[in-house]
Image (cartoon, helix red, strand yellow):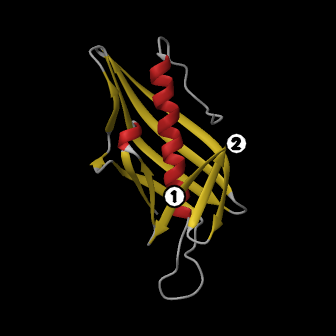
Amino acid sequence: MFALVQPVRSGRSSRSQSLFRRTIRLGFGAILAASLACGSDSTAPEAIEGRYVLQTIGGQSLPVVIEQDESEKFEITAGSFTLSAPNVLTAEFTFRETTGATVSVLTSEVNGTWSRSGATVTLTVDGEALSATLSGGILRIMEDPEDGGMGEWVFRK
């Protein structure tokens, strides 16, 4: 499980915590994909280091609803991965929680490492690894909707 810096949310259900952590893991996967690159005009791989900003999740522009029921809505409003040398990863996500008329903004930051082997980038946080693809400054992480995922996460450098 990722070592997340999570905001304290009173009344947060275990399902919400699970979705929150899954969202962070997905984001990390996207950053991994971004860090994996193939150069187009040279034999050298595309530069990985930099900040990748979340553009879409499952084809939807932000904000994207992650969980919603009769009493609560939880959305991701922003996200980014920063890949630095030597292989340092920082992921930041911002969420909006609406419960009745109360709206709260929540943020989370997590640190880890990244590595690259050919066209595959591996992002590791708290012992968990994710894979992503990078091409032309776009990092892509795929989450299988059939497994409860939200589809493709797209980050742009």
Residue at horizontal 41 percent and vertical 43 percent from the top: 78
- Name the residue type under label 1: Ala
Is residue 84 left or right of 69 when viewed as pictured?
A: right
Residue at horizontal 46 percent and vertical 63 percent from the top: 157
Label 1 residue SS: strand
Quadrant containing the N terminus is: top right
Sequence order check, earlier mark of 1 and 2: 2
- Of residues 85 and 131, which is closer to you in this image? 131
Tag 1 near tag 2, CB within 8 Å: no
Residue at horizontal 58 percent and vertical 87 percent from the top: 43
- Of residues 104 and 124, which is closer to you in this image? 124
**106 shown above or below 64:** above
Residue 106 tag number: none
- Of residues 43 and 64, which is closer to you in this image? 43
Q: Position of residue 38 (x, y in %)?
A: 52, 76
Count every numbered label the image shows and give the total. Answer: 2
Residue at horizontal 49 percent and vertical 12 percent from the top: 10
Label 2 residue SS: loop
Is residue 116 left or right of 134 when viewed as pictured?
A: right
Q: Is residue 149 visible?
A: no
Number of other residues with Cα within 10 Å of mark 1, as a class: few under 14, some 14 to 19, many 20 or more: many
Number of other residues with Cα within 10 Å of mark 2, as a class: few under 14, some 14 to 19, many 20 or more: few
Residue furthest out toward the front? 146
Q: Position of residue 153 (x, y in %)?
A: 40, 51
Residue underneath mark 1: 132
Residue underneath mark 2: 127
Q: Position of residue 33 (x, y in %)?
A: 51, 60
- Find the distance from the CA under tag 1 to the CA under tag 2: 17 Å
Residue furthest out toward the bottom? 42
